[in-house]
Image: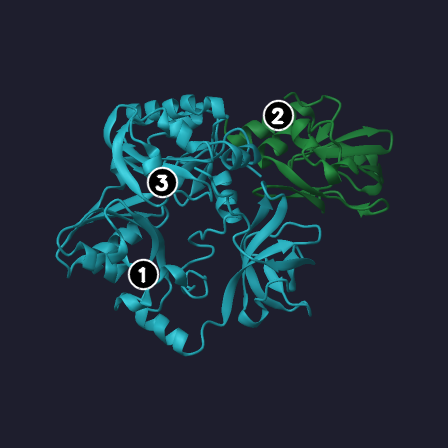
Amino acid sequence: MSTPTAPTSLRKTSLNDMHRRMRAKMVDFGGWDMPVEYSGLIAEHLAVRTGVGLFDVSHMGDIQLRGPGSLEAVQYICMNDASRLEVGQAHYSAMLYPQGTFVDDLIVHKLSGNDYLLVINAGTREKDFQWVRSHAQPFHCHTSDYSDYYTQLAIQGPRAAETLSKLTSTDLSTIRNYHFTWGTVCGLANTLIARTGYTGEDGFEIYIPSDVPTSERVWNEVLEAGKEFGILPCGLGARNTLRLEASMALYGHEISDEINVIEAGLDRYCKLDKGPFIGSEALHKIQSEGGPSRKLVGLEVIERGIARDGYPVLNLDKQPVGYVTSGSPAPFLKKNIALAYVPIELAVPGAELYVEIRNNPVKARIVPTPFYRRPKKQS
Amino acid sequence: MAYPAQYRYTREHEWIQVDGKQGTVGITDYAQESLGDIVFVESPKVGDKLEKGKVFGSVESVKAVSDLYSPVTGTVTAVNQELATAPEKINTDAHAAWILKLELSDPSEMDSLLDAAAYEAFVKEETGH
């Protein structure tokens, strides 16, 4: 239960001093010294579901592919069909190994006809960049790592648009979900404003220069703008429970180099008909051979107990058949939920299973995902 | 928050208050602060025998599970039922929100526990500040 101080070898975002001054609890997240919570995980989670929350997500990586061959490169490296993107549009995608398992998941943004931005996970930044650079090489394009150039802030929640609109002249209502534009934010011209996020709520991610004074100024201005909506700075703890309620995958949990796209249930983002790409052959083969042997399902623990990452899943004979990839109390839903891999024949909604919680089999039920879906807005 | 002088403490962050052979056990303010929002307390039953230094239950926050270690050997005489529905009481006031009461088998075991000043120094050492 100890909370040792961060060794200096951990990487820091430009807002690290700010987090410490705000008395956030800090943790080592994939080699990064990041805030896990400020005022409290539950309060932060609820602020995002009912008002607005602010996250420092500058640890995410930003890879740019530029040049006449950039679309071809993206198409070869990523599983979604980037030819369907218009300029100003983004989509969820992933980079795969030849066997159809995950290098990483990411968001592809089409910045211009010959220019794509891939936003990738923090813990896999170096691996991802090497992967992209080596596989983009045959195509006529240039790969750049802009990760350290940007402080990335996520403003998330039903009041996110009202909060951000105070700081920009851009009409945010013109930015549809998974679209982006450039505008002046807090006086910073040409700021990338994307209607994306990892919380299951409406919200924005903005990319500002990573120098400390600018990063801190914008952080403070967003908090000030969101004050009337009860904005809270939020840590990675709430980020994790929010994405789990929304059933969004986390690298190293629901997806990894040992889990393929079809098992993970992400095949709707994988366009096998777009032409060959890394991993496509293996996935064609898995499908032609009758599909995967296991599947990711949502679980709701129905007896007393909390399922946690890595806990075994047992069948009704109490034999181990799978495992929990992410499990937690769900602060908004007020249930104990989990995502888990189970054999395909057991992956039936409504079916009951056990999660082995510290040597005790505790009953859980397979439920449809996402656990949480945000209410439709009437705007 | 100050650590009550009449309590004794473990290095695993439990507190115990003893009156004769009757002990009351909870977790420290430092423990609740480290855990964050507490959502679940797993306690033993009345009549269960606890052994000094052995796990007797757990406390769970949204993000973590933490085992509870018995400060002394004894028999459980009461568990705080309130924590079943309101575990967050531990966050509000860890030194008042007791988890269980027990009858001590050997009150001399208390001598090996930390007093408030020693516990506070131990926490300082553990957190490095």
Q: Is residue A31 left or right of A311 when viewed as pictured?
A: left
Question: Which corner quadrant holds the C terminus of chain A?
Answer: top left
Q: Which residue is mark 3?
A: A195
Q: How many marks?
A: 3
Estimate the x, y position of residue A306 in percent, counting from the top left: 64, 49
Judging from the image, what secondary structure is the residue with disc 2 in? Answer: helix
Question: Which corner quadrant holds the N terminus of chain A?
Answer: top right
Say whether disc 1 or disc 3 marks the residue closer to the N-terminus: 1
Looking at the image, which is closer to me, A278 or A291?
A291
Q: Which residue is mark 1?
A: A79
Mark-to-mark CA distance, 1 and 3? 21 Å
Estimate the x, y position of residue B19 in percent, counting from the top left: 84, 28
Q: Is residue A48 left or right of B18 when viewed as pictured?
A: left
**Residue at 54% of width from left, 47% of height from top?**
A372
| Marks 1 and 2 on same chain | no
Q: Residue furthest bottom?
A: A289
Is A160 located above or below residue A286 in the figure? above
Dot 2 alpha-carbon crowd within 10 angstroms: few under 14, some 14 to 19, many 20 or more: some
**Residue at 55% of width from left, 35% of height from top?**
A46
Is A328 located above or below residue B7 in the figure? below
Judging from the image, what secondary structure is the residue with disc 3 in? Answer: loop
Determine if residue B54 is in view.
no
Disc ID at residue B120: 2
Q: Chain of mark 2?
A: B
Q: Are marks 1 and 3 in contact (CB under 8 Å)?
A: no
Dot 3 alpha-carbon crowd within 10 angstroms: few under 14, some 14 to 19, many 20 or more: many
Chain shown green: that is B
Colour of chain A as rendered = cyan
